Image: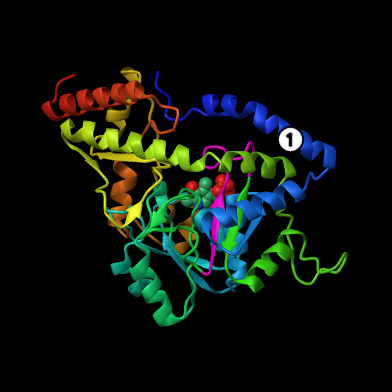
Amino acid sequence: MIPFLSLKEQTAALREDVLAELGRVIDTQGFANGPAVAQFERELADYLGCREVIAVNSGTSSLHAALIAAGVGAGDEVVTVSHTWISTAWAISYAGARPVFVDVDRATCGMDPSKLAAAIGPKTKAILPVHLYGLPADLDPILAIARERGIPVIEDCAQSIGATYKGRQTGTFGLVNATSFYPGKNLGAFGEGGAVMTDDAAIAGRVRSLRDHAQQGRHNHVELGFNWRMDGFQGAVLSVKLRHLDAWNARRRAIAARYVEGLKRAEGLSLVPGNDWSEPIWHIFPVFHAQRDEFRTRLEALGVQSGVHYPRPVHLQPAYSFLGYKPGDFPIAEELAATEISLPMFPELSDADVDQVIDAVVEVSTKLSTGTT
Ligand SMILES: *Cc1c(COP(=O)(O)O)cnc(C)c1O
């Protein structure tokens, strides 16, 4: 069986390097927010080319922190996409605001800039595009609309660390941006983690304060604070892993290129078209087929595991029924949710594994399009 994702080989290869760094954390007792976390923050800031990185305890917390730091609060609206992991919307709700969705674009699977202006109203306090699957959203038109109206942009980079938009790293375009180090992400901790990225010193200071109970000086709490501190162990693991990120992402691009070439033979299957302005990191390799569930069952029978990201858009989740959206409101998001199949994607897949996936996908596509079993 070819798994959709396996961390086994990568984790085993890093074992000795990681254990040495974990030993240093134990020796210095920097268990919460200690020196290993501070070192990782500097390394990630250098890698991305931004001034400040503030590590936190999850991607969800990083979005929550970014929203508060951008000035979003009770009664405000934040414009985002419905085709995303639910945390993007949770964070808006945690900040006391209301998520307002815009549809996505098939070409990027991200926010459709041509539909953005219509979603902006007097209460809009931020625009939150998501670089889903590691494919950069089309930022320039989004930033232009935001700038015209004086509304900050916050990037959700949970799936895109290392991806570039017009030669520049995602996570460096918005006023303040957020990412996740959930173990399955391209840069994953050995546990939970996230980070906020910004060039703005005041915002960075506010996030640093918020994550540690909003203390300014010991026992002086200046606003409602949180415990968003990152574990020292996670900082140590992430420093080790960051050194490999470019090589891993390059391998993912090579796998994606092999899929694109091999899957030209697959009937009835669509892929995201490439473009010449972004370099994706393929956190997920999505393909789309009208008979998604049957397709996945048949793939599994041929020894290929797959995933779905995500089967139900946020605007149709029970938790968000109070927003009043209904099926048909965001046709592209709904179409992607109904047809997406995530093929196996992780750097340790061999070319032979990828070819086996391609052969299975082509076989299933052919049989479904000719109606054979
Ligand atoms: C993973 C993810 C998050 C949340 O990150 P956690 O670390 O799991 O809290 C937010 N947004 C997107 C798009 C994600 O993929």
Give the quarter of the figure containing the N terminus: top left
In the image: residue 83, left or right of residue 257: right
User: In this picture, which residue range is highlighted in magenta?
Assistant: 175-192
Q: Residue at x 62, y 42 (%)?
A: 238
In the image: residue 71, left or right of residue 359: right
Q: Quadrant of residue 204?
A: bottom right
Is 327 placed above or below 293 here?
A: below
In the image: residue 62, left or right of residue 251: right
Which SS type dominates the magenta stretch?
loop
Q: Which residue is mark 1?
A: 22
Q: Quadrant of residue 119?
A: bottom left
Asked whether 26 or 203 is in front, the reply is: 26
Disc 1 marks which amino acid? Leu
Is 124 placed above or below 57 here?
A: below
Q: Quadrant of residue 299?
A: top left
Does the magenta run of residues contain 185? yes
In the image: residue 15, left or right of residue 297: right
